[in-house]
Structures are given as structure tokens and as C-alpha cells.
Amino acid sequence: MTTVLSKNVISVSHLYKEYYTDAGTFSVLKDVNIDIEAGDFVAIMGPSGSGKSTFMNILGCLDKPSKGDYFLDGQTVANLENDALANLRNKTIGFVFQGFNLLARSSLVDNVALPLVYSGVDKDERTARALKLLEKVGLAKHSASRPNQISGGQQQRVAIARALINNPRLILADEPTGNLDTTTSHEIMMLFNELNQDGITVVLVTHEQDIADHASRQIKFVDGSIVEDVRTKISHSQERH
Amino acid sequence: MFSAMFGEAWRAMGANRLRTFLTMLGMVIGVGAVVLMMAIGQGAEDSVKKSISSMGSNLFIVLSGPPSSGGARSASGNAATLNVKDANAMSDLDGVIAVAPLSMGNAQVIYAGNNWNTAILGTSPSFLDIRSWSLLDGYAFGLSDMRSATRVALIGTTTAHSLFGDDVDPIGKTIRIKASPFTIIGILESKGQSLDGRDQDDTIIVPLSTAQRKIFGNQIPGSVRQIMVQAESDKVMGMVEDNLNSLLKQRHNIREGAEQDFSVRNLTALAKSAAETTKTMSLLLGAIASVSLLVGGIGIMNIMLVSVTERTREIGIRMAIGARERNILLQFLLEAVVISIVGCLIGIAIGVGGAILVKNLTEASIIISLNAITLAFTVATAVGVFFGFYPAKKAAKLNPIEALRF
């Protein structure tokens, strides 16, 4: 296994993603290079079809690049088997989606605990840890409710609690506020800020500037390439140095 | 892990109760049919086995009259071409341990105000040994009764019940068969139904000589319609059959190639083939019932495929948070197996209930065996795994991104 000696959580070099259709080859990502330090808070912006979601999927080990290297936590993931990728998604990465993606039939506590089922944690510990996180996101008293019994903002908090359950180093959020009103959006962003202050690296995709302003670094994608990479704040990791 | 997945499967089934119930119904009907059919089949086999063992072992029956029909002839056993001397000669053959000449017919029997029409059987004392027929009470007649044509009789339980009711002891009572008075000296043990469904207990047995002189009357002296022959073992059956044929040909002066005036039937072989037939019937019943089990399995597969498609997004979510392919596979497989096992348990309950109902309604012999239930359960579980595997594999092989977009 190749190890890159750096404090980067994410290190991507010469990354390409191509789709093959009847109409010909369709390049979504073209020679993307980026390093993201541990503890950073990064917003990825760009118009629809700019490749930012595809990039997030590759970062989240849901998709594989066509070409190039991707080191997650110093470990190359480009050529890993499906089971190894599942393990990374389970333990190293926490995912937050635009549409929350909670299981409608399960209670909130079961939703939050679900990743632990796949890590082989026993039931009592699963419930204890899930309740603790629900408390952290302020929903402890709703633990037995179903997702459709709470508001969108609350559902997103549950999804964040679920993303945190295995103490990941990295939170990936794909338009986490896309389905929420402005007030709720900012509440959710405050929560991401708190997590970032606890030392978790946060990467989020958004197309709203005021959401991106919560981050410390803003990266802009156009047509599958990075066209802008600006540090807007000193990141929490840098503060500590 | 496993208990969590079991809970998931249970919840998934509960989410669409009507659909789960209908899918299960296929299994319920399949398993119920298998259990019920096997109970009926095994019951039939068992009653045939009982009839065979009540018949006696290694038996031949020699009938008077030609073995095959053609032209206008009376049925075999009706022409009086055999006689007691033939029977005596047979008992000297190698491998023969007992011979009983039989003369039978129906007659009206009267005791006090009651009368009853029953089968009268005139035979020698060895008949009871050949049929391994013992007496409930009293004693059997002996060779001296044969010689002097005593008017004594053994009575079957059905006949005894019809003539005497429950309160009177038949032993020592005098009944009239046709015009002659007979003293009952013994009561025959109950034999139940014969292979052809006759009640073997509806009978009266008297010494052959008495039957011929006092009941059946004007026949050629000593002639009989049937002779029952018992061989000493299964191995010598073939030899005994050949010897019986050649002995009778010689005694009746039948030339080689000419038509015989008797026929030898291997009763044991007939009984075995009857047993085989019942066994085949019972297998056939089981096979037909199994088809419905198969159809039930296909129903499960169908619903599981629908379920995988409907829950594509859920599968995507699970994969995104770290479910491996085998976790998804196991989850859907477990659902299929839970549906088939729960269906199977209900099916067993219905099958057993149905079997008990049939038994009570028809008084037919029904045997509910643990083997049949275990078999149905095993097959149902296997059906669940087999038909659940393809949809589960399909779910596990989904691409997480495409599944999330669904």
C-alpha cells in the first residue's frame, strides 16, 4: 500500500472521470488536483454539471475514478475492492445528503445506529452511542419517532448524527442545505462548524455563496476542472499550529 | 448483527402486510397440501400393510377352473375341479408347511329372533394357523371334528355382534345355519378389512366336511373351490409354485399344452404389488403437492424482485453508510426465508388440522408423521433460500450511486 507522508486527509492527483455512452466519451472530471488538510472546512462550488457531485462521490468512495490517484488518510483507494470501499464508507467517512436519506420505516435512534450494524457493534452499545449523538444534535426526546414525524431541519440533524456515529475523520456533505429554508440552513451550518472545531474535516458541496462563506476554503469547479481555490479563513487545524 | 437483520426483515414484512400475507399464502397452501397429502398417503400405506400382515405370509391360493377366461365360462373358483385329495397330496410337497382346502358361500344365520347373512367358510383346522388367526375365546375344531362332520362353528366378531349383541356370550350357544343347528365353540380375533375392503370379521368358520354336507349340500363329495397353501419361506415360493402346477397337472391328467382346470396364484406377490401401488399413489400425491410448494417459491421470488426494485434507494443508503454486498444479500435472503418459514409453520398447522378433520369425517386411516413435517419444513426453507437468492444477489450487486439516485 502506497503511503503519502502528509497531514492531508484527502490528496487527489491527475484525477479523471469519463463516462462512455453511445454518443461518445463524456469527460466529467479533467485532471483534478487537490490536497485537503486534516481539520479543514472546504466548500466546493460550481454550476450544475460542473462535476462537483461526481467528485464528491469519488471522495466518498461511492464511485471510482477512470484515471488518477486518490489518497484517503494516506491510503490509496483508487484500486480497492468493493468490500474495502464499504469499510471506508462505514468507518472513515460520514456522508450527509441533500435529501437526508433516512430509512422511513426505522426510528431515529435506529437510523443513527445503522452504520454500527455494519461495523459489528452489539445492540446495547449501538443504542447508547446513537442516543448520545441524538442528544448532541438536540433530538434526544424524538429518538423513538419516525423521520416523517419531524421537520426537514431535524431530519438533516439526524443524518448528521448518523454520519458521526463511527467517529469519522471526514464528513462529506452534498448540498446538505439544498432542501432547507435559510434559517434552518444556517443552523445546520453552525452544526458543521462545531464539528469542524472538534477537529473533523468537513467537505461540502453547495451552490449558495452564503453557505460557502461558513467554510474556510472555497473551491470552484467549472466543466470538470478546478478554476478557483481560495482560502477565506484560517482553518481550525492551522489555528492550532 | 444477525438479530438486527432479523428485526429488519420482520419490519420490512410488516410494512406491506397484505402483500406479505398473499406471498406467504403460496407457501401456506404448498406446505399444507404436502403435509395433508403425505398424511393421507401414509395412512393408506399403513392400512394396506396391516391387511397384508393379517393375511398371513408366503401364501398361494389354488383356484378351481381355468386361469384365463375365453368364451362363455364361469369365473375361476366356481367349477368344482379340486378336491380334498388334491389338498392332501399338496401337503406332501417339499417346502409346503400347511394346506387348507376351502369351501365357501353365503348363508342366512339365525339366533333366537336375530338373523344375519354372512360368509360361511368350510375349511380344515390348519386354516387358522396359515392365516395366523387366533381366538379371542373358546377353542378351535380339530381333525376329529373334520372326520365326523361335527356341527361346531367359530364366529367372527362382526357376526357375533350382529347376532348376539353386546350382552350375550356366544360360546356354547346354538345358531341355525340354513336348517342345521351349530354350536359356537370359539370367537375369532378381529382382523379388520382385507385388501379388497371386505370385513374379514363378518364370517363363520366350520369344519369343511360339515360345510359340504350340511350347508352347501349337493356337490361332488370332497370337492372344493379353493385350496390355500403356505410355503415355509419366501425363498421357496418359486419352487413351490412350480411343484403345485406339475402335481395338479399330473393328478388331473392334463397334457402338456392343454388347458388347465385350475390356477395357482401367489397371494403374497399380489399383496406386495398392492403395497407398491399404494406407495406409488402416496408418492404421486406428495409430488403433486410439491408442485404447489414450487409455485409458492416462485411467488416469493416474484415479490422479492418487486421489493428490491421498490427499495433500491434504501439499498443505496445502506451501501453509502458502509453495508457490504454480503450484508445486503443476507438482508434480502433473510426476508425471503422468514416469509417461507412463517408460511411453512402456518401451512403445517393447516395441514395437520386438515388431516385430523379428514380422519374424523371419513374414519380413513391418516398418519401424521414427524418425518413429513420435518421434510415439509426443510423443503420450504430450501425454497426460500433458492428463490430468494436471485433477487438478493440482484440487490447486492446494485451500484451505490445509481441506487441513491433512484
Image: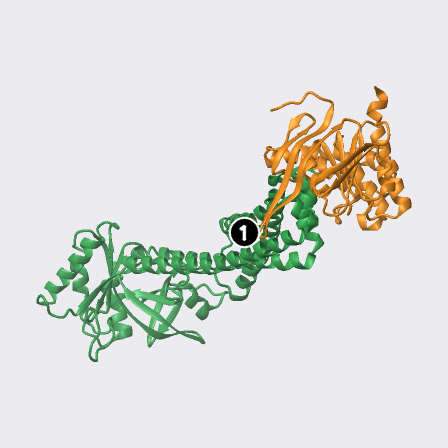
Dot 1: element: helix
Nearest the viewer among B31 and A118 is A118
Which colour denotes chain B?
green
Which colour denotes chain A?
orange
| Quarter of the image where one finds residue A222 | top right
Q: Determine if residue B9 is in view.
A: no
Where does the N terminus of chain B fall, quadrant-wise? top right
Residue A229 against residue B296 in the figure, above or below: above
Residue B385 against residue A130 in the figure, above or below: below
Residue B360 against residue B342 in the figure, above or below: below
Nearest the viewer among B336 and A230 is A230
User: Which residue is at 67% across, 40% downward?
Assistant: A29
Q: Left or right: where does residue B325 sit relative to residue B266?
A: right
| Quarter of the image where one finds residue A153 | top right
List the residue tagged with mark 1: B387
Q: Amino acid at mark 1?
A: Phe
Picture coordinates of residue A186, whole percent (x, y)? 89, 41
User: Which residue is at 51% across, 60% downward?
Assistant: B292
Q: How is the image coloured?
A: by chain
Q: Left or right: where does residue B85 sit relative to residue B185?
A: left
Picture coordinates of residue B199, whole percent (x, y)? 40, 66
Q: Left or right: where does residue B334 sit relative to residue A162?
A: left
